[in-house]
Image (tube, helix red, strand yellow):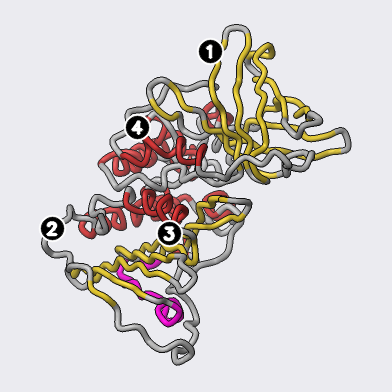
Amino acid sequence: MIRKSRKAGNPVRKVLGILMVVASGSCSAQAAVQQPQAGAWFAISPSSSGVLPPERFELEANSSGTLIRWAPFGKAPESWGSITLRPDGSIEFRWAANPTALCTLRRTDDRTYDGMCQGAGLVERPLTLTQNQPPNGLELPLSDADFQILAKARQILSTPSIWNRHDDRFCEDDAKQKSWSLFCALYQASVDVASVYSHRRPVMEDVRAVVGEVTNGRSFEHILRDYNNLEVTTYADIAMILDRTEKRLQARKVCTAPPGPDWSADAPYKLPAPGNVAQPQDLGVTYWSETVSHTVQNKTFRLLARYGPITASGHVPDVWLAASSSATRRTRKLTNLEDVDARGQLPNGNHWRYASQCGNSLMYYDVPTEVAAFFNRIMDGLSPTNVHR
């Protein structure tokens, strides 16, 4: 369970866990005595060499209390037993691999618990259990590893006979049976190449976007699993998805060239008058989207990532501009595409930011200063351009 920290070349990776620990909300001594909410949670733990990648858990409420399961992507969930609720609102549970090791965490807000894990054979270690969704790879810029992962997935899915068309998103059985679904081939390729699976690294984003393109934005619960399992999906379709993903990655590589003088300087917007702009119908064609959530003082804010056609250009929503007290933007023209990075402030003092590059966009709206700073660190780590410094 306790993994070694992998080498971090991105400053966001170095501070992510610490930010999630200290910025999730101030401690409340009057927190109500109640079990943590059922659903997906993440455990974040610093180590002597940095911050370990977040671990994913699932909490399930039943008649006897709340159960905690270790549930990383690609693996079958492993029960850790019950969570004990103490009268002061703190919780206790034990490591499955070391039952003598007890974790005692105190609630800091509705979505976060902080504390320590200690016991026989385990060095005392801080731990945060949170429903604030960490990026899980979203902050990784495109790199050669993405192309290597795609090539490895192609190698794994080399023939129709080893394609598993009945995906359950648990990949141990795929490895044992040498029969791989689209998701599990990418999962195993990520582990082989990068030593860890990152759910939102660029190659995974673009595979999802390509599936969205070929299905005209069809809604899926789990896009890779559900597309893999469609009755009409063939092995040729899976191979085509991987081929188109490579083309999309190549296009993104061109778009995400290192920064240079081609970026314009910050320029203020001439803001429209409030109420004099039409409500936009959409923020652009979207094939896939996900959010990163962050809670401060019991209020949750979200950073939205949207992926659409690779040739799409971004457009800041008019209603955002009309509601702003000030706004600036930078642009960059690359071939027939225009990258945009804009940010603004609202009359209430909160902030928004919209950045679009190669058909991919990230945005947040109406968030306080400390949340904007947290989201900006993630956004600035997404691309080597880092257009706003």
Mark sitting on residue 260:
2
| Name of the residue lying farthest toward the right | 63
What residue appears at the point 87 percent right and 33 percent down from the top-left corner? Answer: 64
| Name of the residue lying farthest toward the bottom | 276
- Asked which secondary structure carries label 2, the reply is loop
Near-viewer residue (157 or 6):
6
Dot placed on the residue nearer the N-terminal end, 4 or 2: 4
Dot placed on the residue nearer the N-terminal end, 3 or 1: 1
- The residue tagged 1 is 123
Depth check, mark 4 against mark 2: the one in front is 2
Dot placed on the residue nearer the N-terminal end, 4 or 1: 1
- Residue 33 location in percent, x, y? 79, 39
Residue segment shown in magenta: 308-323
Dot placed on the residue nearer the N-terminal end, 2 or 1: 1
What residue appears at the point 20 percent right and 57 percent down from the top-left corner? Answer: 254
**Three-letter amino acid code of the residue under disc 2:** Gly
